[in-house]
Image (cartoon, rainbow, N blue to C red):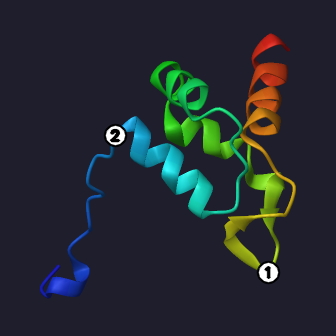
Amino acid sequence: MDSEKDIPKVKLPTTYTEQVELFKSRNLHIENSDNAEKTLQRINYYRLTAYGLTLKNPLNKEQYVSGSSFETLFSLYEFDRKL
C-alpha cells in the first residue's frame, strides 16, 4: 500500500435518521420514519440491507425498484429470522 489510492476508506458512522434518509434517497418507500428508525436501532443497517438485494434495480444497484418498501424489506428479514 504505497499510494493513497491503496488506503481503504472507512465509512463514517451515520445516525438512524440519516440511515432512513439514505433508504428514501434510494427509492425505498418508508411510510413511518419513526418506526423505521426504531427498527434500525434493533437491527443493524447492513444486516437489513442484505435482505433488500432482490428489491434492487438490476440496472442501478444503488436504487430499489419502484414500489419497494421498508415494510417489505423488514418482512423478508422477519421471515428469515423465524425460519
Residue drawn at the location 50% of the way across and 52% of the way down: 21
* Structural crowding at the residue carrying mark 2, measured as other residues with C-alpha within 10 Å and reported as few (<14), some (14–19) or many (≥20): few
Can you say which quadrant of the picture contains the C terminus? top right
Task: Report the residue at 83% width, 53% height from top.
Answer: 54
> Which circle, 2 or 1, is nearer the viewer?
2
Q: Is residue 44 left or right of residue 27?
A: left
Q: Taking 41 as reference, is 16 above or below it? A: below
Residue under numbered circle 1:
59
Residue 72, how many percent across, how many down? 82, 37
User: Residue drawn at (70%, 61%), measured in percent from left and top?
Assistant: 27
Q: Which image quadrant is residue 56 in?
A: bottom right
**Residue 10, located in which quarter of the rendered image?**
bottom left
Name the residue tied to disc 2: 15
SS for dot 2: loop
For marks 2 and 1 on the same chain, the one whose residue lies earlier in the sequence: 2
Q: Residue at x 83, y 63 (%)?
A: 65
The amino acid beneath tag 2 is Thr
